[in-house]
Structure formats: structure tokens, C-alpha cells
Image (spheres, coloured by chain):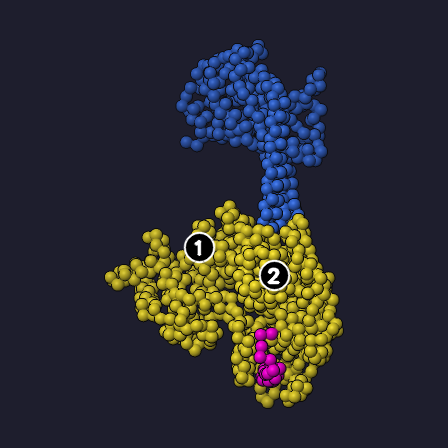
Amino acid sequence: MTYEIETAAKDDSRIVKVSGAARTGKTEVLVRRTAHLIASGIAPESIWVEVSSRIAGDELRSRLADALEESGVDEGAAARVFIARVADICREVLDDERARPACGRAPRILTGAEYKFLLEDLKTSGMKNRTLRSLLRMFARQWASCEPESSWLAPGEPADIMNLLVSKLRHIDAMVPEELAFRCAEYLKGDEGADARHRFAYVLADDYQNLSRAEQTVVCYCAEKQLVVVGNSNQVTTVNTDHPNAEGFENFDDVRHDVSVHTLKKAFGNGKAIAASAELTRHGDMNRLIAAEIPTDDDMGDPREALVCVKWETPVDEINSMSKYIRDLLDEHSDMTRTYIVVPNRAWLRSAVDACRQRGFKVDTAGMSRGIGGDPRETARARALVAYVKLALLADPESAVAWRCWCGFGNYLLNSDAWMHLEEYADERGLDVVRALSWVSDAVACGEEPFLRCKVLAQAWDTGHAIIERDAKRRGFALMSAIGAEKLPEFADIERLMTGDETAAELFALVYRELTDPHFSIDEHRLRFISLEQLCGLSADNIIVLGCVNGFLPNRDAFEVVSTDEDRLSHMNEGRRELASALAKGDRRVILSYFSKADLELAEKTKLQVARVRSENGVRIALLHPSCFIDEMWKTNPGTTGGQQFLAEHGLA
Amino acid sequence: MVQPHPSLLLVLDIDESLATRETRDEVSRCYGYVGSTVIRPHETPEDGTLVNTIEMHVRLAGAKYLREQTAEADDLWNSSIERWLFNQFHTVGNQMMIYNRRQREEGNVELYFDWLVVHFEEGTFKVHVKLNSVSSLPPDCSKVIAQIRQALRDGSIEAHITDVYIPSPESFTAQASAWEEAEPEREAARLEAERIEAEKTAAAEAAAAAAAEENFTEAPDLVPSDEATIDEESWQEELRRRYQLPTPDFEIDYSIWGVAEPDGAIRAFDSDKHRYVDAEEVKGSFAVAEIG
């Protein structure tokens, strides 16, 4: 630990800001500060360390346990520190019985799949899809900015859609993810939320620049005695929000009195990779003033491997050969938790995972944002989604969200018209929608038809209840089988995490949590796959980035002529920041792997940036360029090694 | 039955020093939409004070509607003339203020009028309306004139009377004096209000700063103002300032009328009591309502 880090960790000032380039020890400051507080007698439960994800939280907790052990403090205290995302705190705040009346709804956040049903319901407004989506994006942007709705919600279409959105959400007692921090901040700012403020004596926020303004506001309101924020505006990335407020970190000390500022200068780790990362910061919109002293002592392994670019011919070559290399690399390492395979998208993930499994690896894909996909209009193509909704019903037969989804399966419009009539029916009678569904079912059974298409809903109610009656008491793997989730890839990781005795509610909580905030299992023998943005808050020994080609890195939107210059630049800068951040994290080894051509159909489907098209043996082939960021690192770029030579150097040819 | 609509002739009786070519052109341009407008200069009084009068001649083809005790006269007054008067007072009153505002902006000579004299029935009866400090009058003066008409018809005001002043010059003088005497009180109240407002603002700012300090949020005194918002607000304020019409010092109380005898003597008539009153009653019978 350097003097800089120690000083920052022992700073008892009320407000502390720590900034520094990648790998200068910003997160280490938080770890050390937390350890110092606990060693000083502060109750661990009174400390909140804000992290971007459970993945980052797990690593931080592990580092904290080590730091506590070093200090001679019971490392078990690490388990009692509240290490969580802002979203977790927001849900806790708004789930309180005092917050419910102020908010009007429970903080039950819709998952991506559940959101599809809400979107279909919003289309009953008659508004064009494009306009609707544009308005919803505007809402998300404004919620993130934490400006009061009265200041930006214009009368007319925007207000009408907002009213409809809130009405739909009120009926199912839920929220959309984008509004969570905003509603929480509004509540805490108001008189009703006064008692909910200052929940933690100490709040330490990692990567503060990645939080939206609303999230930053929540963080501030939760602190009582001290607030420590760490970050680097050059590392801003969209992890939990599409609208990170980097300015909120840059100007943090300009708009507050008596902020103690620490700037970390010395970087640790892989000198070559950090130098390459620093070189990237000289491009685009990154702040060139945020720089670090590059470590020169390269005592962390073979310097030839510190930063390598490898060129393959085709994606198949890349994946087959890289999996071979990874097998060789990790053969002597039983602990794989410090190696991350970075893949650009889920299509690449599947191929890479298959190839690695064939090499005998067990894998963990928690680092790739997942969801339960499928088209609810055709249940045969949405088996995972159907299983999820069944589980939701079993977990809570009163869940309006679950019933809404259940009632929408198998219909082109997800029965949004019938659901709208159900809402009106419920409002007229002062019922919630679940009670109203039950009434409708009874009415239909008596031969009545309270509104148009009510029979569809009644039928859904009856089948749903039949499932509940049949399977409510099942547990564990039997339950998984009953809902049809057995052997579905979307539930593979869940099965791994199960003890086998979970009730429906427990299993649903597990599934929901993994959907909204996944984490790697503690199994050290699993190869970890991750996306670039999910590397936020992590450190590693080996970072292997697959698919470093234009179109993946940066994504194709950085090149598309259909976008504006501003949009293209924004995508370019985002990709550059993510790569710069990732480069610095590989303490021993960073490998950037790319390929020069691919089948044209595959290239189009996966949105690669095609440089040229030519025919090879009657097949149309897309020629590709390596990521333009590799060129930007030219001063530090060690040059590209051909794939076969790379394998030969490792005795794998 | 559709009632005839009066037409308007405006005569601006102004001091000869103000009746320049530029003034005539400007008046013609500005007042032209109100009605036919004529400038009639008069000699500057020996004491040099400027007294300007604006005359409103109500032209209705010889119709009789003031003293006539007929249903047609009532119908004409109720359905046409009173409302027309209200509208004309609004238009003319507004026009006088707008004219002067423009003259101020251009650095030209402003025209302030002391009295607006309404000529009824070919000038056989005149009502002299005192204008306020910004040379305007409330449109509701049309109701006062309706009361005068009623007083004429029920004999409270004698048939031979041809001029009524609203308010009487004596009443207006008393109101103006009372307003001036109350100036120190008003000033003290204004200062007190400013002090309280300043204290409130300071307290609010201190509370906001304390809340920001407690909640670790942005300190209000350090947050840079949004330039775009400031520019917008400044521009809006500039517009408001530019186009806001002035407010008079005080609202004139028109309840005490001055009924002029042919020999020039003016007797005070209390419209609330519906009778003539003496000077002492005049002094104690009004309250000056301060504007703003």
C-alpha cells in the first residue's frame, strides 16, 4: 500500500474525493478505509460500500476480508458490511411502509422480459411505436438527471404517456428500472423521506462517475458522518444506467464545501498494458490530465505476454485456438477466478463457451448480462419465459406482474386490449387487478361477459390457478422440473446455485436476483466469461479479449452512416473508454485477439463492420479490420502476432 | 332590435408648446385606430403649468338618452352606450399609457392629460373624468356615468346642470393630499416588507446550505447558475419590464362628484348618499387605495 492510499484511507474528513487513473488503487482506498473504520470500532453494519454489481461487490468483500485479516481484525466482519448497488438501497428505501404511500407503488422492478408486456400495454394509447419509444427514452434520460417532473414533463403527448405509464405500473404495482433512483431521490428529498435519510454512518462509493445524477443524489442522502467517493471520469461506462453523470464526479469538490481531495498518481500492475491504456486516453474525449506513473518493474511474469495482439483468420480459428491456449494457460492454475474471457456479445459467448467446454472447462457466464428472452407471442419459442412466469405465480399467487405476463402468452398483442378492459373493470369496482381477474373468472363461469375478450383472461386465470394448486408445494429440482425449467440453458446457472430444497418463493428470489444482478459462483474451477463493461470494479491476472474487430470494438454504430456524427463519436468514445479500462486490469497478461475475415452472413448478423466483400470458393466472405483502438495504441503496441506463431511460441501448434 | 353604435371623436386639447409637428404625426399614427383625432393647442398659462385635456365626443346622430324618460332611451343606454363607454375608456386609457411608454423609449415628448371630458348629446352635457398619475382611467368609470344619468333622471341632479366632475376637484385634492401624507407610512411599510423578505431569503438560503451540508449534496452557493436559464430569465424579465404598463400612484375614488353650476361654482355630490354634501363630509368620506 502506498503512502497516498494510506493517507486517503485514514482521512476522517466529512467529505472525501479520491481520483486517479486506472489501476492507481482507488478501490483499494475504499477497502482500506473500510478496514480502518472497522478496526477503529465502527460497526460494520453502519458502512455502505457502493459497487457497480454483485460481481464487483464479491471481489471487494474478498479483498476486505484479506485486509481485515492483515489488520488482525475478525475477517467475518467483512460479511456484515453492506456492499451493494445503489439500486439495492433504493429498493430497500422504497419498500418501507412509510415510503409506499409517497410513491404509490412497490419497488418491484420489471425485468427485461416483463417490460415487453408493459410496452405492449402502452401501445393501447394508439401512439406510434417510434414516438412511444422516443418518449420513454426521454423519460429515462430525465429521471436520470433527477430534475423534477414538473420542470420537464410537457403537457400533451408526453404527459399523457407518463400518466398512462404510471397507471399501468400502478395496476401491477411495479416500477421500471429507469425510474427507481429518481423516485428514491425524490422521496429522500421530501419531508416524508426525512427519516429515511442518513441510513449509514459511512458511505463509500466506487466508480462514482458511473452513477446517474439521481443515483448520486441517493448516495449523498444515505450518508450521515462521512461520504467518500472514488472515480475516474476517463473510466465512465454504462453499467447500471445509460446516463452516467461523470460531471457529478469531476465537479464533486467544486460544488461542496470542505472536500478533502486525494489524487492517486502511481499505477500498479502490468506496465505495458497500463501504458497502452494511458495511450488510449490521449484520444477521443478522455481527459489527458488524468495520468498515472506507469509501473516499470515488470516482475509479474513473462514481459512478452504482458500485452499481446493475436491475429487469426476466421472466428472459428480464433475460438478454437484461443480455447486451446487458455486450456494450456490455466492447466497449472487451479484458481481461475483471476482470469476473465471478455466476449463482445452473446452470440460469441455461445461459441466460446462451447469451445471451452470441449476443452474440458466448466464455465461461468454470469459476467455477461443476460435475460430471459423469447417471444411471448409464441409460447413454443418462449419456454424459459413461460417457466419464469410460472415460478413467479407459484412464488406469489397475488403478484400482479406475474398475472399480467401469464395473461399475455400466445396472443399477438399479448392481450393488451383485454388487460386494459380488466383495469377499467377493476377501477370501477375499487379492486386490484388480481382480485378483478378472480371476479371475471367467476362471472365467465356463470355465463356472463363483463367486457370484451374477458374469456381469454378467465381462461388464463383458471390455468394459472391449476398450476398453483398442483405445484405450490413442490421444492427444489422437482419444482424446476414442474415449471419446465429443467435443462433450459437460461436456468443452467440457477441449477448450479441451488441447494435443492428451495420453496417457490426462495427459488424465484434466486432467479430474479440472478437476472437483475448476477454474480460468479465461488467455484474457483470455473472459467469466467464477462463483457467489457462488467469488468468495472474488478481486477484480474489475465484478461483475454476475443473479437477485437471493428463492429465489436467499437460497435458498428461508431461507423454507421445512418447515425449523426455526434452519435458515432459517442459510440467510439464509449468503446475506447471500456477498452482502456479493461487493458489496465490484467496484472499479468492482456491478450487482444481478432480475426481478419468471416462469412458475410455471419458478419451481417453479428453487426461486424465489413471493410470489403470478396468471394472465396463460391462463398461470400467479409474482410474485417482489427479494432481501430489497436492502432491508437501504436506507441505502445508490441505488434501483432499471427495465430499460428502464437500457438507455436506456446508449444501448441 | 339592433341598437346604433356611437362613433368617437377625440380632441386633444394640449399646451401649444407640445403641439409640434412630430407630436401631431405621432398622435395621428398612434391614436388613429381609436377614432378620429384632432389636436387643439391652447396657449400656455401665465404660470407656465401644463394642463392637457382629452375630449371624447360621443356621436350618435342626435339621439337623446340622458334625461329622456322613455323605454327607447333606456334601451339605447343599457344595450349599447354604457358598454361602448366601458370599451372606449379601456381603449383610450390603454392608448394614453402605451403612447407615453413609446415616447419614453424613443426619447420624445410624452403627453400627460389631467382630465378626460366626455361630451354627450352634441356636447349639451359633459362629464369631466379626472385621470390618474399615469394619464389613464379605469373602464368602470362607465358605471359612474350610468349613476350620473340615473341622478339626472330622478332629479337628484338638477335639470339645468351641464357639467359634472368626477371626482370633484376638492375631493381629488383631498385624496392627493392624504396620499402624500401617508407616504412616510408607506415607505416604512415598504422597508419593513423588504427587511422581512431579505430575512426570509437569508433564512431560506441558510436552511438550504445547512440541508446541503447535512445531506452531502451540492451547496447552493457553489452550484454554477445555468447560463441558458439565466439568459432566458433575463430576457423574459427584460420583456416584462419593457412592456409592462405603469401603475398609477393611487386609485381615484370617484364617489364624490363635483356638480358645476352655470356660474362656475361647484357643489359636492356624494353618490353613495345620493345627495349634496358639504366640505367637511367630503374630507372624511373617502379612503385612498394605494396601488401596488
Indicate yes or no whether the magenta region holds residue A233: no
For label 2, the residue is A35
* Residue A293 in view of the camera: yes
Q: What segment carries the magenta color?
A: A314-338
Looking at this view, name the residue that lies furthest to the front.
A72
Task: Determine whether, in the image, residue A283 is placed left or right of residue A497.
Answer: right
The chain containing the residue under callout 1 comes to: A
Q: Position of residue A460 (x, y in %)?
A: 34, 66
Callout 2–callout 1 Cβ contact below 8 Å: no
Task: Determine whether, in the image, residue A158 is placed left or right of residue B10.
Answer: left
**Which amino acid, by three-letter code, is at mark 2?**
Ala
Question: Which residue is rendered at x = 58% and y = 56% of the image?
Answer: A41
Distance from the alpha carbon under mark 2 to that under mark 1:
38 Å
Residue B79: quarter of image: top left
For label 1, the residue is A105
Picture quarter with the N terminus of chain B: top left
Q: Secondary structure at mark 2?
A: helix
Q: Colour of chain A?
A: yellow
The chain containing the residue under callout 2 comes to: A
**Which amino acid, by three-letter code, is at mark 1?**
Arg
N-terminal label among 2 and 1 = 2
